[in-house]
Amino acid sequence: MSAHSTTWNSRFLIALALVGSAAFAAGCTQRDSIVVGAIPDDYRTNHPIVVAEKQEKIDIPVGLNDYDMTGVQRAAINGFMARYDGKAAPMVHVMVPYGSANSAAAMRIAGQFIGYMHKAGVPQNRVVQQHYQAPADASAPIRLTYANMRAQVASNCGRWPEDMLARVDNKHWANFGCSYQNNLAAQIANPADLLTPRESTPIDAQNRSNAIDQYQRRQVAPEFIGTSEINY
């Protein structure tokens, strides 16, 4: 065999080895990405925050001999209805106890609740009064409910399908991050911020003029440099 043939065969074998190594590496990379990608280990993926309709509800206690709305009841309604969207105007359900020891007082106070909500901006035709059966020996509350768009966690917290101490794969347990996501969702004042950015507001021309004027006169806040003016 000639030296030329030997050299050609060596180059062919080297090229074949390189192609095989590349294919093997590509196969390993693709296999790993599939395996890892199929097992989500991010609390934001396991417990995503979504914007969906949720029933807001509150139980307001009513005394046996209550004749008028109390300050506690008025404050409770104000806080509860603060999240009511007057433009969407969802239906407000007023659930009044029936058959309880305080049913007469609850019926009287419920009418005052409805009048108070109308004055606060709830349309006349968006309040429905209903009754529910309550124990005869109890002072049952009046329940107010309405549907509202809220940011909330899609899954329920408190799921423990397995012992967290028995895991050896160093992965998050099922309930990991759920309470954090719930707390974060509860702090979002406007759920629409999760859907799209807000539109730009008009500029404050006076504030912009003052800022440019201070910059031109080389003025900064005194708490940052100990004086109200910098001399260049």
Image: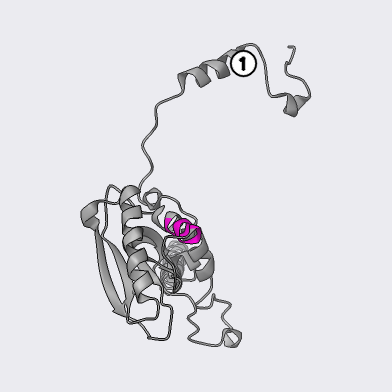
Q: Which residues are magenta?
A: 71-77
Residue at 39% over, 55% down: 81
Horizontal and vertical percent position of residue 191: 39, 53
In which quadrant will I find the C terminus? Answer: top right
Is 136 magenta? The answer is no
Name the quadrant containing residue 108: bottom left
Q: Quadrant of the N terminus?
A: bottom left
Dot 1: within a 10 Å radius of its alpha carbon, few (fewer than 14), some, or many (20 or more) residues? some
Q: Residue 216: percent from the left, percent from the top?
A: 61, 12
Instruction: Tell me which residue sits at (49%, 18%) in the image.
Output: 206
Front-most of residues 7 and 209: 209
Residue 73 lies, with reference to residue 175, above or below; the image says above
* In-front residue for pair 9/155: 155
Q: Which percent across, then down, holds residue 31? A: 42, 73
Left or right of 179, for residue 50:
left
Judged left or right of residue 96, residue 162 is right
State how many labels appear. Answer: 1
Asked whether residue 209 appears in the rendered view, the answer is: yes
Vertical relation: 22 (above or below) 124 = below
Is the stretch drawn in magenta largely helix, strand or loop? helix
- For label 1, the SS is helix
Name the kind of residue labelled 1 in the image: Gln
Residue at 79% across, 24% down: 226
The structure residue drawn at horizontal position 48% and vertical position 86%, both measured from the top left corner, is 161
Q: Residue 72: within the magenta?
A: yes
Residue closest to the eye, 119 or 190:
119
For label 1, the residue is 214
Q: Is residue 136 above or below residue 36?
A: below
Q: Residue furthest left?
A: 125
Q: Is residue 196 above or below residue 67?
A: above
Q: Is residue 13 visible?
A: no
